[in-house]
Amino acid sequence: MREGVDSPLSQNSSYFKKEKDQTITMDRVKIEPRQRLYSTRREKIRQVLVEKRAFLSSQEIHKVLRGQGFSIGLATVYRQLERLVEQGRADAIISPSGERLYSHCGQAETHHHHIVCRICGAATKLDFPEMETLAQALAKRYNYKNITHSLEIFGVCLACNGLQSSSIKSRTKPNL
């Protein structure tokens, strides 16, 4: 490269400019921070959520992807999951143990709630419009505006309950 000529990739180049708000400007093309280009990694993570049809931790998703031979770091899984949540393509809840769990959510989904199995992570979407009415009534009663809410219900699903019952019975059978 000739002296005095900026390469588009050199540090002194005006080709890439990182502005205060983390917006990247590339030769007059502006890419906003939350509107980055399509991500293969994000799509792979979304596919795992669709296939598993349960709430999973970041570590569980990472393990599945690595088991499929996909090279991805755990930090990348965390970042991409948060992007999916921001885009409305994944739900995130906090488990009773305090761990953040993720599940697939269709793009057209509206605000909704789940009941989640503590053993297998299976989730059932709750049809509970009374919750929205209750939240609004409580906000009005206590003079709150611009409210949001989160309802997370955990239990043991029928399939896992059957497994638990049979394992308890097998442990309590008298030896003959």
Image (tube, rainbow, N blue to C red):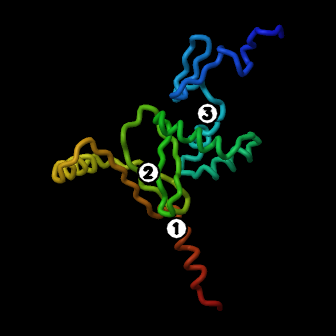
Q: Which residue is mark 1?
A: 162
Q: Is residue 10 above or below residue 46?
A: above
Residue in the picture at 60% in, 79% down: 170
Horizontal and vertical percent position of residue 69: 77, 42
Horizontal and vertical percent position of residue 87: 48, 33
Residue in the picture at 58% in, 52% down: 57
Query: Which of labels 1 and 3 is toward the front?
Result: 3
Q: Which mark is residue 124?
A: 2
The crowd level at tag 3 (other Cα within 10 Å; few <14, some 14-19, many 20+) is: few
Q: CA distance from mark 1 to mark 2?
A: 18 Å
Left or right: 127 with respect to 72? Answer: left
Q: Is residue 154 above or below residue 78?
A: below
Horizontal and vertical percent position of residue 95: 49, 58
The front one of 167 and 75 is 75
So how many labels did they put on this image? 3
Left or right: 1 with respect to 110? Answer: right
Query: Which of labels 1 and 2 is toward the front?
Result: 2
Three-letter code for the amino acid on which mark 2 is drawn: Thr
Three-letter code for the amino acid on which mark 3 is drawn: Glu
Could you tell which of marks 3 and 2 lies nearer the N-terminus?
3
Q: CA distance from mark 1 to mark 3?
A: 35 Å
Left or right: 41 with respect to 111? Answer: right
Q: Which residue is mark 3?
A: 43
- Residue at far front of view: 4
**Helix, strand, or loop for circle 1?**
helix
Q: CA distance from mark 3 to mark 2?
A: 23 Å
Could you tell which of marks 1 and 2 lies nearer the N-terminus?
2
Q: Is residue 102 above or below residue 29?
A: below
- Cβ atoms at labels 1 and 3 below 8 Å apart: no
